[in-house]
Amino acid sequence: MSSRRACTWIAIAVFTIALPGTADAYIHLGFESSGGTRAIKWTAPRVRWYASNGSVPGVSASQFQSELAQAFLTWESVPTASIAFEFGGFTGAAPFEDDDLSVLGFQSAPEMDRVLGATSFIVDVFSGTIVESDIFFNSIFPWSVSATGDPNRFDLRSVATHEIGHFLGLGHSAIGETEMRPEGGRRVLGSGAVMFPISLGRGVIADRELQPDDIAGVSDLYPDGGFRDDTGIISGRVRVNNAPVKGAHVVAFNPQTGSLVGNFSLADSSFRIAGLSPGPYVIRVEPIDDADIDSFMDPAGVNVNFRVTFHPRLIVAPRGGSTASFDVTVPAK
Amino acid sequence: MNCARFACVALVVVVAVGRAEAQTTSPPTGRFEVSVGAGWLGGASFGEQPADLRGAAGNPYRLFESETSLGGTGLFEARAGFAVTRRFVVEGRAAISKPQLSTVVSSDAEASGSFTAVEDLDQYIFDGGVLVRLSELEAFGLKPFAIAGFGYVRQLHEDQALVETGHLFYVGGGITRLLFSRAQGFIRSGSIRGDLRLNVLALDLAEGSRSQGSASASLVMTF
């Protein structure tokens, strides 16, 4: 353990192929500290990362590094966020070692037979600063770096883009729809965020490109100069029978652009959706039912016994600042 | 040659107009006029917008559909003009209305039926243009006119959360009917005026433009 870390906290976020996961429009990874939940983030303006020098069938070490660089660039290119990355070089170190290096590499984890990749963190719990973050890609699966995708393999860059979202401190997004497979697990019908916890499947390269929910999440965590002034926040509470609802998935839909950005209600029933372009929004509230609750948050106290609800008023995101809090009342099932 | 032909055409037009005006009450020139009135501002469609997710097969997965529109509403207006000539009046107008913006959501993947979310707006329009008196078409004491111009739109969203601005162009026409006139006095004449307009609005936060009709009636005083 490094001397600069008085205390560390380690977490792992995984990206699955069929397990139900938690997805919220965007949510920030964090930890409980005195005074509430603290989001974790990098504080250095430029984050250095290293690539393991191993390879797997279909992906050489140099191809691996190239795909990761493109995935990092996708996040770095968000115009409303200010975070940059630097390739430190190849390394013989493996992911998930406490070595002060943020390493991304393949590893074989046959016991995690539904996990494509995972991200770990070492965090200074006093400041919330990410000190180190590693990503592993499960080499038991077939991987592809094909520009158009390989129908029999998982697209490395798409999965890397998802994991790098975690690397930045983003949690899972719940904007997506799934259905249960007869043989178990879930099949994704539609995904509204790269940070949705379940992969779109083999051969799909769509998640190389960020969606509005991803952009709002990273911009809220690493805001660029004018982001706070140019975008607005919608905040409110979710209630059922005048009681607070924890874990309701609240989505703001822009009827002019079609964008979807969301978040969850907390234990006190409050929610906050940031990074919204100014204008009116439709508010849709649903229970977490398209992935395991623990993919998103601690399941304790989460209420899923209510019906999908649309708020009867259009809520206007201001240009800078937040709306006054309002209540969305959902009917119990 | 061209100049001579233009002069002849102009002379014919002037003579024709002069004859028409000579047969009716000559509109005043070089005078100010003000009017106040009320009317109806028609609705405008903002179009349909689906909430699409990325589908695994490449085609989008539709979470729900939406259609947004601005409802029709009453309006109040005040206008000031100056008769530059007997045919042309330059005028400016301020109008206030309170339309309702509504979005209808349907075909939700997890909920049956349709839902409507609404918001009340305060809308202010400041525009100006030219009124052309078509005195030669006067009949039964009704004097038709044509109007065209452009202006500025300001929409104040609910709870004053956001101010949205834009611009508009309009064309239209209407009729006036003289109520009284006198040769002396501060108020030289009074009349009623009816307008029909087609407004084409373009708001800064909304893509594209949309058309909106309006009808109004007002009381006009000429000084």
Image: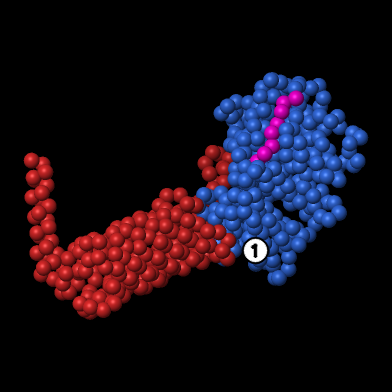
Chain colours: A blue, B red
Q: Which residue is found at the position 53% from the left and 62% from the top? A: B157
Which residue is nearer to you in this view: A53 or A146? A53
Which residue is nearer to you in this view: A147 or A259? A259
> Dot 1, how many residues are within 10 Å of its Cα: few (below 14), some (14-19), or many (20+)?
few
Q: Is residue A253 left or right of residue B79?
A: right
Q: Which residue is found at the position 73% from the left and 49% from the top? A: A296
Q: Give the quadrant of the C terminus of chain A.
A: bottom right
| Residue B97 drawn at (x, y percent) | 44, 68
Q: Which residue is found at the position 52% from the left and 65% from the top? A: B119
Vertical placement of residue A289 versus A196, above or below: below
Which residue is nearer to you in this view: A13 or A142? A13
| Residue A151 is at least partly visible in this image | yes
Q: Is residue B184 left or right of residue A299?
A: left
Chief secondary structure of the magenta portion: strand
Assess whether residue A86 is covered by the magenta stretch: yes
Q: Which residue is found at the position 40% from the left and 66% from the top? A: B95
Q: Quadrant of residue B162?
A: bottom right
Assess whether residue A61 is covered by the magenta stretch: no
| Residue B44 drawn at (x, y percent) | 40, 60
Q: Point out the stretch of residues depicted in magenta.
A: A81-88
Which residue is nearer to you in this view: A285 or A84? A84
Q: Given the image, on which type of amino acid does mark 1 rest?
A: Ala
| Residue A210 drawn at (x, y percent) | 61, 40
Q: Give the quadrant of the N terminus of chain A.
A: top right
| Residue A14 drawn at (x, y percent) | 75, 40
Indicate the chain on which mark 1 is placed.
A
Vertical placement of residue B36 versus A198, above or below: below
Vertical placement of residue B143 versus A100, above or below: below
Vertical placement of residue A108 versus A197, above or below: above
Q: Quadrant of residue B175?
A: bottom left
Q: Which residue is mark 1?
A: A324
Q: Secondary structure at mark 1?
A: loop
